[in-house]
Structure formats: C-alpha cells, structure tokens
Image (spheres, grey):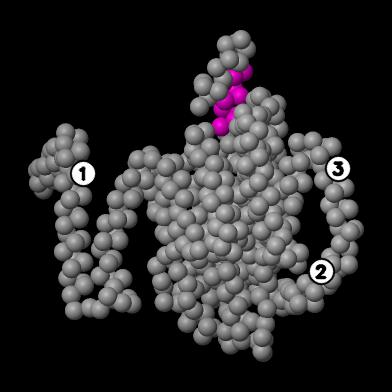
Amino acid sequence: MLATLFGRAVIIGKLRYYFLERHYSLTVRAGLISLCLLMTVLSAVLFKDTQLIGTDFILGLMPTLVMAGLTAAIIAYGSMEKGLLAIVIVSTVLSEGLNTGTGTKVTFTFILLYLMLGVWLFRMLVVERRLTALPAPANKFGLAFIIVVIISFFWSGLFVDQRVSYLFQDKLLPRLMTGLVMIISVSTYFLFANQMRSLGAMRFFVWWFIGVGAVLLVLRLGTGGVPTPLNARGQFPTWAGALALGQALFNPGLRWWHRGVLLAIFLGWFYVVLGLGLSWLSGWLPLLVVTLILLLLRSQRLFVALMIVVALAGASKLDELQEAFALESNVSGSTRAEAWANTLDVANQHFLFGTGPAGYYFYFSTYLTGFFQLSHNNYIDIIAQTGIIGFAVFVAFWLAIIAISWRTYLEARKRLFKGDFRYTLAITLLAANCSTLLTMMLGDWVTPFPYTQTLSGLDYTIWSWMLAGLTVALHYKIKSESEYLSHQPIERSLPGVEGLLE
C-alpha cells in the first residue's frame, strides 16, 4: 500500500516538474489551444438543430464565452491594474450585456468585475494563501455590509409575510441579482483600493474620464443625446465635470489653453444638467456641490464671488425658481415623501435585516393598491433591504471614505509640492466623495434598485465605488512617497522628484 502511494507521488512529482516547471510556457500554450478546439467542437454540437435566437443561441455560445472568460482571467492575473482600467473603459463606452429574459441585462461591466474579483481571490487564497488588503477604516464596514447583504437575502426569505412568500419564490432571480450587484459594488471599492497602485494608472483614470467626457459632451450638445452603447447616464456629468474642474484649478503644469478646454468641458456639462430643468436636482445639485468645495479649497475669494453670482442670479429669477420648485414639489416631492413613508413602514416590520435585496417592492405589490412610487433614495432603499444593521454599516462605510479623503488631502498638502498631480487628485476625490453623500439622497445613484434603474444601472453607479477605492489607493501612494522623501536630502529630492516617484 505504501509503495503504491509512494509510486504515485513520484509520478505526480515528475509530471509537475516536467510540465509546470521545465516546460511551463509550452504547457500553457498547448493547454489553451486544446481548450479552444474543445470549446469550438462543443459549441458546434450545442448549436446543432437550434435556432440562432433566444436562450438556444446563448447555450450554443456558452463554450466560446467560457473560453473568452478564461483567456481574460489569465490576462487579468498578469496585470490586475490594466484589467481594472479596461473595466473603466467598458463602463463608459460599452453599456451593454447579455439578456436575462427578465427585462434587464447582465452587463459586461458586471461580468468583468466578477471576473476580476475571482482572479484576485484566486491569487490570495490559492497562490499567496493569505487574505491581504491595505488597512483602511472603510474596509471593516465594507466587509460587514457584504455579510449583511448575504444574511438579509436568506433572512428575508425565512421571515417573509405569508401573502408575499409566493413572490419571493417566483422572483428569486431578480432578488439574487440585486444582491450580487450590491456585493460587487462594495467589492469594486476593494479592487480599486488594492490594485490601483501606479501613478500612471491613476492618471489614465482621470484623463480617460475627462477625454471621453469631452466626446460625449459634443455628442450631447450636437445631437441632443448620447447614443448607446456609450454611457453618460447617472452621475457621469458630475464625475467628468469634477475631474475636469479639479485639473483646471489645481494642476500648475497645464497651459492656459489646456485650462480653457477643461473649463469648457466643465461648463458644458453644467449647461447640460441645468438644461434638463431646475427641478431635476439629481442633475445639477451634486455638480454644484463639487464646484463649491473645489472653489473653497482653491480660493476663499473665488468661493465668495461665486456665491454672490449665484445669489444675484437666483434673485433675478426668483419667480421662475419658485415656480419650478413648486412644480417639483407637487409632481415629485409629495409622491416621494409618501414613498419614503411607505418604505419605512415596511422596514419597521423587518427592522433587523430588512426585506432582502429588492424585497420591499414585493411588499408594495401585495399591500398597496393602484399606482405606487418607489423611494428613489439610496438611504431609504438600503434600510428597507438590509435593515438597520445594513444601513448602519453602509453609512459608516461612506463616512469612513470621507474621513480618509480628508486625511489624504491633508497629507498631500503637507508632504508634497502644492499643485502636484497627487494633490490635485486628492482635492478632487474629497469633493467627489462628499458629493456622493448628497447624491444618495436624490436617487438610487450608488446602488441601483432593479425596479427603477434596473440592474444595468450598475454601469453608472459603479463609478462612485471606483472613486472611493481610488481614494484609498491614492492615500497609500502619497503616504509611501512622503516617507521616501523624508529620508532623502532635500537638495537631491527636489529636482528629480517627479521622475523618481513615477
């Protein structure tokens, strides 16, 4: 018996040495080619006697998709940072996905994010054999929220009202997908916080948003809309405008015409969101908040001047403003207040872990007659779906992001040259993250609700989580480089600092 086992161990060891150590590259190439041929044959068999429509088409295409996913995973394993940047690109220019047959799509952004998460977990659990993450106060709250979402999914099914239970069973897929969207949203923060490590990647992130923002702005002003699959929905105007304005105000390396172009991009998006009407607070108010914060940090005089201009402009159009806000209050304000009250009534009956992902919609469908309004408020949505526990850790997470944003700004101002790219980005992220707290009051712009934004809303809600993760990554980038500079003679560190820290 021992001889048999020993013999097998020797054979396995020889095979491992020959294929994985001596001829690793050849093994990988041969394995991928063999898998490609196998998946092609399997796909042809599944396509046989089927029509190229509906689920039959997806079934036949599945082996090819598996092969493409495996190839993408191998590429992502080699460069996690580039994989994340690819997702940034996809989320802005390819807002499409696979139809689930339930009226919504599993977007390519969703698929790629889970692919990257799987690769990261594989690397930590299998290769490195330890879970590691950059320490940050938001980490424990983010992880706690993921756990609460999982608990609330099962908890809500166990303690569902009798009259609603059949809907929970029939709508299992929407409930499951909503939970997965909430989980991948927080996981995106962890991915960007721990894998965006180089200053070049951070620069790419900023200038990609500004560049694609300029293109989409031209399309929006020229044609009256942004054609699919290009994506300028949600808070895209806020993020593109914030990044452009931040660079224009704080980056000293730009020429005057660079600043002019950046200010034009910012003003263009402000014009777009104001053109949708003063009553659409979700459009212009977050961008206004970002603007005020950036101007306050740039110059108190500029801030005061802008406030005077806003006050004078408001006074000159006081009647129009009162009419617009009165209309908004009559059409949307009262209905939203009623929706919040109805949602909180349901949440009070399930206050511990909530009604589960997407759960309160099914209670509305059962107990409310006629037309009813959903909350259109992330805070209300979270407390209804995950209860008081989920709400507490969710709010704590975002407050922790604001705290580290402030510390990052102070660290950049104290240790690095004022006007450095890191300093510019730190200020912009502080303003953007503060705006997110307000944005969640105005709609489900951070975690999409399936029966308002649909699950494909992840393609534009995910940007808030990317910015949160980028804040932590920048914090540690600045901290590590500050420690490096503190050990260098000042006459040596000053002239070559930009080159040394790239």
Q: Which residues are magenta?
A: 477-486
Alpha-carbon span between mark 2 and mark 3: 25 Å
Give the quadrant of residue 56.
bottom left
Magenta portion: prevailing SS class: helix
- Residue at 65% across, 29% down: 252
Q: Residues within 10 Å of mark 1 (few under 14, many from 20)?
A: few
- At label 3, the amino acid type is Val
- At label 1, the amino acid type is Val
- Residue at 21% across, 72% down: 47
Callout count: 3
What residue is disc 1 on? 28
Q: Nearer the viewer, residue 266 or 389?
A: 266
Is residue 372 left or right of 30 when viewed as pictured?
right
- At label 2, the amino acid type is Phe
Give percent across and percent down for residue 413. Answer: 70, 29
Alpha-carbon span between mark 2 and mark 1: 63 Å
Give percent across and percent down for residue 273. Answer: 68, 59
Q: Is residue 325 visible?
A: yes
- Residue at 53% across, 37% down: 203
Mark drawn on residue 304: 3
What residue is disc 2 on? 325
Q: Nearer the viewer, residue 81 or 424?
A: 424
Mark drawn on residue 101: none
Q: In the image, which is nearer the foreground, mark 1 or mark 3?
A: 3
Q: Is residue 123 above or below residue 328?
A: above
